[in-house]
Image: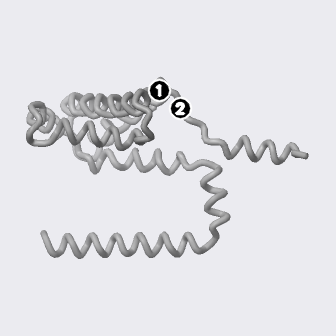
Amino acid sequence: MTTQTDTMNEEASKEIRLTLKESIIALIVMCLVSLVSNWAGAGTDFFAALPAMLIIFAMVVVGMLLSKFIPIGFPAVAWVSLVSVLLTIPVSPVAAPILAELKNISFLAMVTPVLAYAAMAITKMEVDLFKRSGFKIAVISILVFTGTYIGSALIANAFL
């Protein structure tokens, strides 16, 4: 016998997926926020960085479309990465103009709104999973973050 509380918990833990249209609207908002962040953080003129942001927008949309229409279980982020790499590798005929435009974008300035959005996008299911994992997950996370930081610092120190 299922209680009303069990039904509500099941509904709350189901993942809600955005439609393609909703994803594109969210992407447009993130691009605009990233342009403002790029202007505020790097001082690049909004309109000078607009062509670069449109290129990034197009790469992401193509990756999302590939993920939707080629159902092989390849995540959208992997498709976006693949499209971006293929368009910007040195042997690509469009690499030089794309890279020339992308120099107007400070990718560090773009990271701030993206990370803020990622932090807000944590679902109730993920919070419940974290609670069930207990303190062990916190200890492992601290060790992983510390190891990654120290490893990155050692590599940077050795090669820079």
What residue is rendered at 23% in x and 76% in y? 154
Disc 2 marks a residue whose amino acid type is Leu
Task: Identify the image's colour scheme: rainbow, by chain, secondary structure or one colour.
Answer: one colour
Secondary structure, mark 1, is helix
Q: Which mark is residue 83?
A: none
* Residue 95 horizontal side relative to residue 75, left or right: left
Q: Residue furthest top?
A: 21
Q: Quarter holding the C terminus? A: bottom left
Left or right: residue 9 compared with residue 137? right
Kind of residue at disc 1: Leu
Q: Foreground: 141 or 34?
A: 141
**Residue at (81%, 47%) from the top-left corner?**
6
Above or below residue 75? Residue 129 is below
Residue located at (30% from left, 42% from top) = 81
Where does residue 139 sit, x and y in percent of width and height?
A: 53, 75
Where is mark 1, residue-wise? Answer: 20
Q: Badge 2 is on which residue? A: 18
Residue 124, placed above or below residue 92: below
C-alpha separation, residue under disc 2 versus residue under disc 1: 6 Å
Foreground of the two, 13 or 46: 13
Left or right, 43 with respect to 121, comes to left
Residue 64: percent from the left, percent from the top?
39, 32
Instruction: Pinpoint residue 9: horizontal percent, then vertical percent.
Output: 76, 47
